[in-house]
Image (cartoon, grey):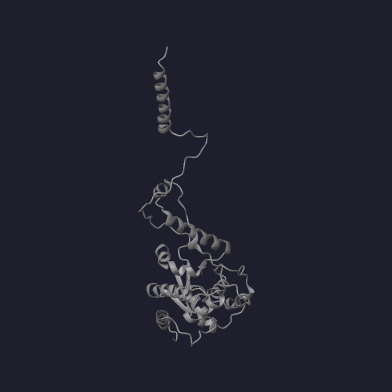
């Protein structure tokens, strides 16, 4: 007869044995099941700049509510210039979703940032090709906040610096928003103004103001055409006779003013409005009365 104690010990060993096997054995996989994903590894690798399809794009640097949509449609009315709605390329990102993705791209001399630039470049080239024109202009105001990145990866890019009196920008934002927070608006306008001043001092830009664009449109656009290396076309001023796509929120100005198809005078800043000290300093540096 078996010793009952030995049977109990044997059962215990078997139970412990099963637990040990389960702990060290690999989990069973279903046929064709995908392996568990792991997060991407951090990498310090910086890829070299890849060739661009569009070597010399044109970027309009401006604050919001500075007349950039008017400038866009005037430029887009030229037979050689394509200036589409705001493309917001800086918000278009690439994700390396597997642990080995970064290593695979590194072997191709690419990284996440350069992949994004290749994608942005492809979008610019696609839009240019579709239009049949040869000069592409991106007039997304938030590009102003990343101008150093644009300059680094498009060293041959050209820049149009569009300025407007900061007081007028503040007034326009305040009027446009439902529940305006003046302190927040001041901070937003100052953020754009600081970057515009950095670009003005650091880049070889063509500087214009919204005020002179609306007061002397032909003279202003003639100067821009010369800067861009294209011939002046008088039809540029009649932008209402051309198709510029839909005017709607997030893609540019959609007000009745821009939809009118006519260049209308810029609304001046209220001279009684006091600007924060730094904004007043920048306005003065740009030639505005404060």
Quadrant of image for the C terminus = bottom left
136 sits left or right of 24 in the view: right
Work out whether 182 lies above or below 117.
below
Tell me which corner region of the image, top left, top right, bottom left or bottom right, holds residue 206.
bottom left
The answer to which image quadrant residue 261 occupies is bottom right
Query: Which one is in front, 202 or 196?
Result: 196
| Residue 222: image location, x then y, percent | 51, 79
The x and y percentages for residue 267 are: 54, 83
* Quadrant that contains the N terminus: top left
Q: Is residue 71 above or below residue 97?
A: below
Q: Is residue 27 visible?
A: yes
Q: Residue furthest front?
A: 4
Q: At 41% from the left edge and 25% from the top edge, which residue is drawn?
A: 12
The residue that appears at 45% across and 77% down in the rendered structure is 207
Q: At which x and y percent is residue 148?
A: 40, 67
The answer to whether residue 82 is left or right of residue 98 is right
Q: Is residue 90 above or below residue 238?
A: above
Q: Position of residue 234 (x, y in %)?
A: 58, 78
Is residue 165 in view? no
Looking at the picture, tell me which residue is in the foreground, 6 or 272: 6
Left or right of 209? Residue 238 is right
């Amino acid at each position: 007869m078996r010793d009952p104690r030995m049977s109990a010990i044997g059962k215990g060993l078997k139970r412990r044995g099963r637990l040990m096997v389960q702990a060290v054995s690999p989990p069973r996989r279903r046929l064709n099941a995908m392996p568990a994903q792991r997060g991407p590894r951090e990498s310090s690798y910086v890829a070299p700049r890849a060739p661009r399809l569009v070597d010399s794009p044109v970027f309009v640097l401006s604050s919001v509510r500075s007349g950039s949509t008017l400038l866009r449609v005037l430029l887009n009315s030229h037979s050689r210039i394509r200036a589409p709605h705001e493309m917001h390329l800086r918000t278009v990102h690439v994700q390396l979703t597997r642990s080995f993705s970064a290593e695979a791209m590194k072997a191709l001399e690419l990284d996440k940032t350069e992949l994004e630039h290749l994608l942005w470049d492809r979008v610019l080239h696609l839009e240019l090709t579709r239009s049949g024109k040869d000069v592409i202009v991106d007039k997304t105001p938030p590009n102003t906040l990343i101008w150093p990145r644009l300059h680094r990866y498009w060293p041959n890019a050209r820049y149009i610096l569009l300025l407007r009196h900061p007081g007028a920008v503040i007034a326009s934002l305040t009027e446009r928003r439902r529940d305006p927070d003046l302190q927040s608006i001041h901070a937003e306008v100052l953020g754009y103004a600081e970057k515009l001043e950095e670009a003005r001092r650091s880049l070889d830009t063509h500087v214009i103001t919204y005020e002179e664009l609306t007061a002397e449109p032909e003279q202003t656009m003639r100067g821009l055409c010369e800067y861009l290396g294209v011939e002046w076309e008088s039809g540029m001023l009649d932008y209402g006779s051309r198709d510029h796509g839909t005017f709607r929120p997030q893609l540019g100005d959609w007000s009745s003013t821009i939809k009118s198809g006519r260049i209308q005078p810029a609304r001046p800043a209220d001279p009684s409005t006091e600007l924060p000290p730094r904004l007043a300093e920048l306005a003065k540096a740009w030639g505005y009365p404060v």
